[in-house]
Image (cartoon, rainbow, N blue to C red):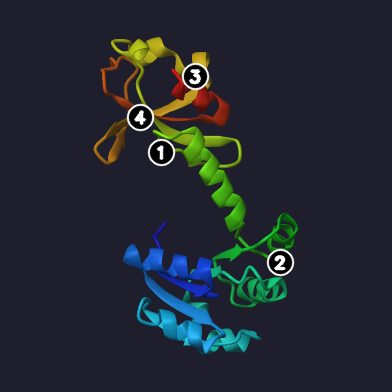
């Protein structure tokens, strides 16, 4: 699948502004839309294009080219009614492939998913989880896949050194899956007869509890 290089962000509050800046930092083209002129003035020099518009219909969306985007981020978490309207228009009328919506509660998330949102983000909840991960796994990059499973690099404990991948039996003994070994910025697969060396960093996938157990070795 071709990676998108342009995004539309609707609603430039704190969350929407941060998303815009992060996308631009990654070299992406960003169209920022908000109904407040002062907000558009504050971000227009930081994005590819910034438009002041209150979205009320399919026509208003098409008038600024929103229908040309594959991914649209709806960051109007504080206005639930507006989020539902915009999400429904994006999916049902403009047929946008990927609509990501910012929400504030789990109930709102369920409703947004019912009207077609492809992914709903609860920023406060996800920031809380990320903080907990950082506190519990202070020396590791802990990438959450969902509530129960994650991917993490593991600097091998001394008890692993000089054992082969097959000898470790990670799936049987620790209920985790070996993805590979970190080499620079890449992860390379390992053969069953690869002998673990001191300083190796293995990339593992598994349940959070099992990964935590390994990180404590």
* Residue 215 vertical position relative to residue 149 in the rendered view, above or below: above
Picture coordinates of residue 67 (x, y %)? Answer: 52, 79
162 on left or right of 15: left
* Residue 148 vertical position relative to residue 34 in the rendered view, above or below: above
Which badge, 3 or 1, is on the more N-terminal residue? Answer: 1
Question: Decide: marks 4, 1 in contact (CB < 8 A)?
Answer: no
Picture coordinates of residue 183 (x, y %)? Answer: 25, 34
Crowdedness near tag 2: few (<14), some (14–19) or many (≥20) residues, C-alpha within 10 Å: some
Crowdedness near tag 4: few (<14), some (14–19) or many (≥20) residues, C-alpha within 10 Å: some
Question: Decide: marks 3, 4 in contact (CB < 8 A)?
Answer: no
Quadrant for the C terminus in the image? top left
Which badge, 3 or 4, is on the more N-terminal residue? Answer: 3
* Residue 152 vertical position relative to residue 22 in the rendered view, above or below: above
Alpha carbon separation for disc pair 4 and 1: 15 Å
Residue nearer the viewer, 65 or 137: 137
**Helix, strand or loop under label 3:** helix
Q: Which residue is mark 2?
A: 115
**Helix, strand or loop under label 4:** strand
Crowdedness near tag 1: few (<14), some (14–19) or many (≥20) residues, C-alpha within 10 Å: few
Q: Which residue is mark 1?
A: 141
Alpha carbon separation for disc pair 2 and 1: 35 Å
Quadrant for the N terminus in the image? bottom left
Label number found at residue 171: 3
Q: Which residue is mark 4?
A: 180
Question: Decide: marks 3, 1 in contact (CB < 8 A)?
Answer: no
């Amino acid at each position: 699948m071709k990676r998108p290089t342009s995004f539309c962000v609707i609603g430039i509050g704190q969350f929407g502004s941060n998303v815009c800046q992060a996308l631009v930092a990654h070299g992406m083209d960003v169209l920022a839309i908000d109904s407040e002129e002062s907000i558009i003035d504050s971000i227009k020099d930081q994005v590819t294009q910034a438009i002041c518009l209150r979205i009320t219909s399919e026509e208003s969306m098409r008038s600024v080219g929103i229908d040309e985007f594959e991914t649209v981020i709806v960051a109007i978490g504080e206005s639930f009614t507006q989020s539902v309207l915009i999400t429904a228009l994006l999916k049902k009328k403009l047929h946008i492939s990927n609509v990501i919506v910012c929400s504030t509660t789990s109930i709102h998330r369920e409703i947004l998913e019912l009207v077609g949102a492809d992914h709903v983000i609860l920023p406060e909840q996800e920031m809380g989880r990320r903080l907990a991960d950082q506190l519990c796994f202070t020396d590791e990059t802990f990438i959450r896949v969902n509530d129960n499973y994650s991917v993490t690099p593991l600097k091998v404990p001394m008890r692993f050194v000089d054992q082969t991948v097959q000898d470790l039996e990670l799936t049987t003994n620790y209920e985790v899956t070996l993805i590979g070994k970190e080499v620079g910025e890449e992860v390379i697969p390992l053969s069953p007869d690869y002998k673990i060396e001191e300083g190796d960093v293995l990339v593992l996938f598994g349940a959070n509890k099992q990964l935590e157990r390994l990180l404590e070795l």
